[in-house]
Amino acid sequence: MRNIIKIFGLSILSSVALLGATPIINSGNIEKQIQAPKDIPTLKKDDIKIEGIENDSLKSSDSSKTVFIKDFTFAGNSAISSEELKQSLKAYAGKELNFNQIQEVLAVVTKVYRDKGYFVARAYLGKQDLVKNDNTLFISIIEGKYQEIKLNNNSLVNDNSLQAILNNAKSNGIINVKDIERVLLLINDRKGVEVSNSVVEAGKEVGSSNLNIDTTSTKRVDGYIVADNYGSRYTGYNRVQGLININSPFNIGDKISISGLVSNGADLKNGKIAYELPLNSYGLKSDFAYTRTNYNLVEEYKSFDAKGNSNIYEAGLSYPLIRSTNENLYLKGKYYHKDMNDYMSGDKYEDKSVNSFVTTLEYDKNYSIGSTPARVFANLNLTTGHLSSKYSKLNNGNYNKVDTYISNDIYFNEIFSLKTNLTAQKVLGNKNLDGSEDLSLGGPNAVKLYPYSEQSAENGYIASFELFSKLPNIASYNHKIGLFYDMGNVYQEKNLDTTFQRKTLQDIGLGYYSSFDDFFLRTQIAWNLNSKPISSEYTNHKNSKFLVQVGWVF
């Protein structure tokens, strides 16, 4: 009897779904509703500043006396070849040079070193015998060696862990600002520690320098609490979610995170525990996580007692290939195991598992468009996985897909800025994906007007543009308004679902964003822009949607 009820219920819902009224909701697509809040004004560590990096002033003379310089030779250079240094001085070779021009020669050589990060390096003239050396100018170079690296640590991370990172700065023995910047940022990447001061000062030996580093503690515990109406009709619109981080619990810069989400009526409950562990002093990290989600569908689904759960296990590695203030490149890899179960009228109608591995390249860079500052962030993900479903075997087996996310910010001036986002996905191979792996056009981080369940498929894109205008601050109250436009389109890899209609969804809207001390508010209203009205949820407002999110960061 229960099987008859289950089959009857599924057939009714499927029939209604064919009419475009009620989508099929299960643990796979519910996972997309559970995303960490974006653009939260979390506490950020200060930018790295290295004191003691000054350029030498150029000596000058009124003397007009010149000397013929045929060529140049160098001593003391190991980081940069003599050929490269000679190339930089081509404009001065084979010419009569006065005192000031010879000083320019030394400045050029020094600049070559400084441009490569060797900010302590210096070129100077030793004793010369131009006649004996066939008018070849002999240039000596002090590249700069470390004498001592001193750490004054007042953080939550033990001295040995931080000292091991600092020692990487002198791996080649020559002082290089890029090496120093990298190790200081790697220290800041550890939880529970922040570099408060870094100074390069002259050592006791000629050509040597000391690097002095001071660190302070960050909060032992931080996190946020956020309330929003980003949910869905079938699991509850109104939600509360929170995150607690325990920083450096074992005094090595690690982190324990506990997060959770619950919708109104507790129809959607999610909990996650994660651990981040530094593996070495070069920036390699591992992370592990477990997530549990339970749901009970309401409204049209309530009479069918539709519910389900999912368990997700994660293990990953990340390594910074490039780590600097203005440019970063990370290589990441993560393994996922997902178990998803769905029930109706007490009987299980879906039992599936997904094993996948995601390889990621993540890049960000500060750059300029003319004199206008800008910043780009991008990631590229390659997923290879295997789906095993006990009941619906249509998409079982191996699959591969590639997806990307690109975000670009342009800061025209102190008031106006433009943010552009692009999300895209493509299946590799002629195979449809499980719904949990599809790209969904709806949701607050996509085409905002539409619900998560409005339209999804294997391949497609979502593009968003928002022009911000900062409003005058009121004491500690910061706020701005935004004008946004979203557009998305998805399509199936194989046209097996005859009810699927490819369409472009668009919206346009206004946003108001504010923060006061540790509190923040985001409000957005989206309107339909030459697109079909909302069809996957019953609503009195099929052509508009109001979104609000309020939170506290601690």
Image (tube, rainbow, N blue to C red):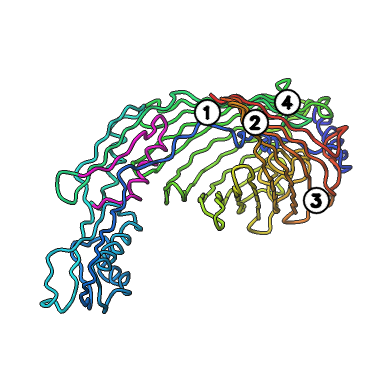
Per the model, the C-alpha gap separating discs 1 and 2 is 30 Å
Q: Is mark 4 on a helix, strand or loop?
A: loop
Say the numbered circle drawn on residue 273.
1
Label 3 Cα neighbours within 10 Å, binned few <14 / some 14-19 / many ≥20: few
Q: Nearer the viewer, residue 45 or 394?
A: 45
Q: Which residue is denoted by mark 2 in the rendering? A: 514
Q: In this view, does 298 lie above or below 105?
A: above
Q: Do the residues labelled 4 and 2 touch (CB within 8 Å)?
A: no
Question: Which residue type carries mark 2?
Answer: Ser
Label 1 vs label 2, nearer the camera: 2
Q: Where is residue 269 in the image (x, y as percent from the top left)?
A: 66, 25
Mark 4 or mark 2: name the one nearer the start of the chain: 4
Residue identifier under label 4: 238
Q: Give the range drawn in magenta.
A: 174-202
C-alpha gap between disc 4 and disc 3:
32 Å
SS at badge 1: strand
Q: Which amino acid does label 3 sit on?
A: Asp
Camera-side mark, 3 or 2: 2
Residue at numbered disc 3 = 497
The quadrant holding residue 112 is bottom left
